[in-house]
Amino acid sequence: MKLKNYAEGRWVEHKGYGFEQYNAITGDLISTASSEGLDYEAMTDYARRIGGKALRSMTFYERGFMLKKLALHLDSLKKKYYQISYLSGATKSDSWVDIDGGIGTLFTYASLRRQLGNQRFYVDGDTAKISKNNTFVGQHIMSPKQGVVVHINAFNFPIWGMLEKLSANLIAGVPAIVKPSEITSYLTQAMVEDIIASGIVPEGAIQLDCGKGHGILDTLGSQDLVTFTGSATTGRMLKSLPHIIENSIPFNMEADSLNAAILGEDSAPGTANFDIFIKEVRREMTTKAGQKCTAIRRIMVPENYLEDVQIALGKSLAQTTIGDPANEKVRMGAIVNKSQVDVVRNRVLEMSQKTPIVFGDLDKFEVIGADANKGFFLPPILMLNENPLINTDSHDIECFGPVSTLMPYNGIEEAITLAKMGKGSLVSTIATSNVHIATEYAIEAASYHGRILILNEASAPESTGHGSPMPQLMHGGPGRAGGGEELGGIGSVKHYLQRTALQGHPSMLTEITQRYQYGGVYKEKDVHPFRKYFEDLEIGDTVITAKHTITVADIVNFANVSGDNFYAHMDETSLEGTTFEGRVAHGYFVLSKAAGLFVDAKKGPVLLNYGLDECRFTKPVYPGATIGVRFTVKEKVNQEKKSEDDVAKGIVKFLVDVYDETGDTVALATILTMVKKRNQEDEL
Ligand code: NAP
């Protein structure tokens, strides 16, 4: 069967013979994949004209909601992907990381919609004050790039690899051309077929090239981007294409890395931490048959524990049953294809010249439920490098399979040196409960790592593991690991956005950004904002309240109610050496009294007040001072209904500016209210 590519709104069969994709367990031919017949110029143009335009007509909020729908849809179909995933040699738990992990990432990115707001651009950070009288301010906004991103992925995570990247570009509003590895593109293709058929994502937002993709970057321009996951060699070659450099095309690279796991000196044999360490290393060596960019490739242990670790790890690895993942007894599946088996074997043989194999035999191992001569199997291999400061093979050569090297260290400083000899890694783990060891390692090794896991008895029960990048946290690493950054919540969304500094009068910037800028014009209306529905509130709507003169009785009463008898409020004689000139009103009283002034008490569209975002007490308030409030609609954040019978509502942020008789601001806060919508049918 010829795998179809999805280009310019159509599924098209590839031309020519194509690359042969084989079942990793049986060795049978599954399908062929090729890029032949694809017109990259037309595809990139289509993405920009059709997909980009459609995505940019939506707000961040709407795109986030779209991701949620997509995640729910794919989740309902996932059984099918698990069946296909077996063909790549993956076990059920390997596939869980790929399939459920990928869909989970979509869900996480969908949730960012509340943070990103209901505009077609994102307002980034606070206003910059750049003038004395506040008539000229600056505000960064970020808007979607008007190009296309090409996602080039490695073979090992055909689903997660695609979805973790699509999550960010789709919510950002940028269309993508997905290019999985031709080795496993049959699985990516199955999911893309469902995405396209669902109609959830606008046409042109996703196109698919299941083949080699050579030339796919040639037609990119200055608004386009590339993300790459794969080997450092391929990544460097593509990143340095003259065309990429000349057009300053952002190129995010995730490459192979030789990740380390370090057993802390406190985690001696016989301790719970020791057992946790052995379990983690075994899991990272055997999950996905070691074909993971985050797998543990270097195991560093105190020299006096070396033998114990070797024995314990050997015993643990001996329990790894290899074979057909459909068989319940099997714990480790196959390598993806014959040529990958050959690459791993050759690298192990090359390394074994100086680094002997101490567990596992490349030629002798049992396979359950499959024919070892037809499928693409390898056993776990543990090597020993007794002189890791001199013999650097283990820090240079990546065996992308169930292979890892054990090495001794003498003191935490040496462990850090060894970890750094990987020249930049995605992740490392240190198994320790000792705060000094953990702190020393975290601080000294951090600049060489994208992520550091501190594993011990306390963190292990809920640890997500050494090998799992989390969507909320950055995935990537410096140096050899490619120098890229993916995931990290909003962090990766920003890769697809252009940051622009807007400068002007606060009133103008309020209108453009739809976020009230301090110093902007107040829109005083006859109707109090608490009497208005969500849709009817305008940014800048303001109430200038009645006033109140603070008394000593206010302070005493508030102290009685709250129990806050701090000396500055209660003891006139204690103020020497403080900044206060007399008894000062509690900041919380000032804010509470402000609420008494700005709240419109009758039942109306405001459902509740659920907190404060920012709060500052900027000037002491003494008895005799007269305060009033400027209460202004600062920002509106949409919310969708949680269920059909939920009340349609949104969040309204109000700026509370409390000022005294001199006009000076004494307290500033942003309060958050939930406000009913007039249109209760509104889905979004
Ligand atoms: P690879 O050989 O470097 O290929 C990576 C991707 O680049 C594949 O889709 C490949 O396509 C494509 N490619 C190669 N030449 C190209 C060209 N001239 N133009 C456009 N695309 C081109 O890596 P792999 O063997 O698939 O994956 C294994 C490696 O990836 C390991 O070294 C592993 O450490 C690394 N990896 C890193 C991460 C990470 O997040 N850092 C994650 C997973 C894997 P074809 O396969 O179709 O030829």
Image (cartoon, rainbow, N blue to C red):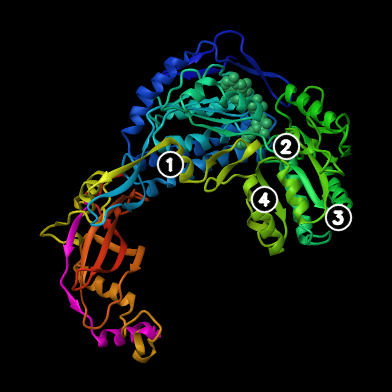
Q: Name the residue under label 1.
A: 68
Q: In this view, does 423 lie above or below 678?
A: above
Q: Distance between the residues labelled 4 and 1?
A: 37 Å
Q: Name the residue under label 4.
A: 445
* Magenta stretch encompasses residue 559: yes
Q: What residue type is labelled 2?
A: Gly
Residue 264 visible in image: yes
Q: How far apart are marks 4 and 3 (CA)?
A: 22 Å
User: Contact, CB < 8 Å: mark 4 with mark 2?
Assistant: no
Foreground disc of the pair 4, 2: 4
Q: Distance between the residues labelled 4 and 2?
A: 24 Å
User: Contact, CB < 8 Å: mark 1 with mark 2?
Assistant: no
Q: Which amino acid does label 3 sit on?
A: Tyr
- The answer to which of 655 and 100 lies nearer the viewer is 655
Please tell me how crowded label 2 is: few (under 14), some (14-19), or many (20+) other residues with Cα within 10 Å: many
Q: Mark 3 points at which residue?
A: 305
* Residue 529 rendering spot, x and y as whole percentages: 19, 59
Please tell me how crowded label 3 is: few (under 14), some (14-19), or many (20+) other residues with Cα within 10 Å: some
* Quadrant holding the N terminus: top right
Find the magenta span and give its range.
539-568
Q: Which of marks 4 and 2 is nearer the N terminus?
A: 2
* Magenta stretch encompasses residue 352: no
* Quadrant holding the C terminus: top left
Q: Distance between the residues labelled 2 and 3?
A: 24 Å
Element carrying mark 4: helix
- Find residue 19 and report its image quarter: top right
Foreground disc of the pair 1, 2: 2
